[in-house]
Image (cartoon, rainbow, N blue to C red):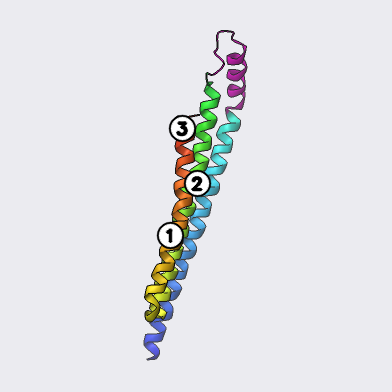
Amino acid sequence: MDKNLNTQIKITNKYKNIQSFVKWSTLAIAIITAILITFAFLIHYDVIFQNTVLLQSTQDQMVGESTITDKGFAYLGAGAASIGFLGAGVGQGYAAGKASEAVGRNPEAEGKIRNMMIVGAAIAESSALYALVIAILLIFVA
């Protein structure tokens, strides 16, 4: 009996270590991506500003026409909006894991837990779909 409990504790600690690694690596990837986007913007800021001034100074530009920088900023905004996909995926994964854990602890409540998880997943997915719509609008309309 003691050996079985010891094995269970080792498995639990292993999953906690993996879960901690996934959380920290996801955070590190998000921070590195934000830093790289910031540096890319700062490096090309002078070029973007000069192109804006040149495009605005030309007399033959039409009023409703978008400039190069408008499209660039629209793509940056679409990339920022796509972070919403990441949040929804992490949230749904966490909810499914906790629901599975709850069913394992209390199998009689499986129906209620499943219904609550489906509602929670739908709410999380709605934010991902909203982020997708915003990203598509920024890319094709702006």
- Which residue shows up at 58% across the image and 37% down it? 38
Give the structural element (helix, strand or loop) at label 3.
Answer: helix
Which label's residue is closer to the chain start, 2 or 1?
2
- Which residue shows up at 53% across the image and 46% down it? 32
Find residue 41 and report its image quarter. top right
Circle 2: residue type? Ile
- Eye-nearest disc, 2 or 3: 3
Give the structural element (helix, strand or loop) at label 1.
Answer: helix
Few, some or many residues within 10 Å of mark 3 (<14, 14–19, 20+): some
The numbered disc on residue 83 is 2
The numbered disc on residue 1 is none
Q: Does 63 sit above or below residue 74?
A: above
- Eye-nearest disc, 3 or 1: 1
Q: Could you say where residue 128 lies in the image, as x and y percent from the top left?
A: 46, 49
Residue wearing tag 3 = 139
Residue wearing tag 1 = 121
Instruction: Tell me the quadrant of the picture where the N terminus can be found.
Output: bottom left
The residue furthest top is 59
Which label's residue is closer to the chain start, 3 or 1?
1
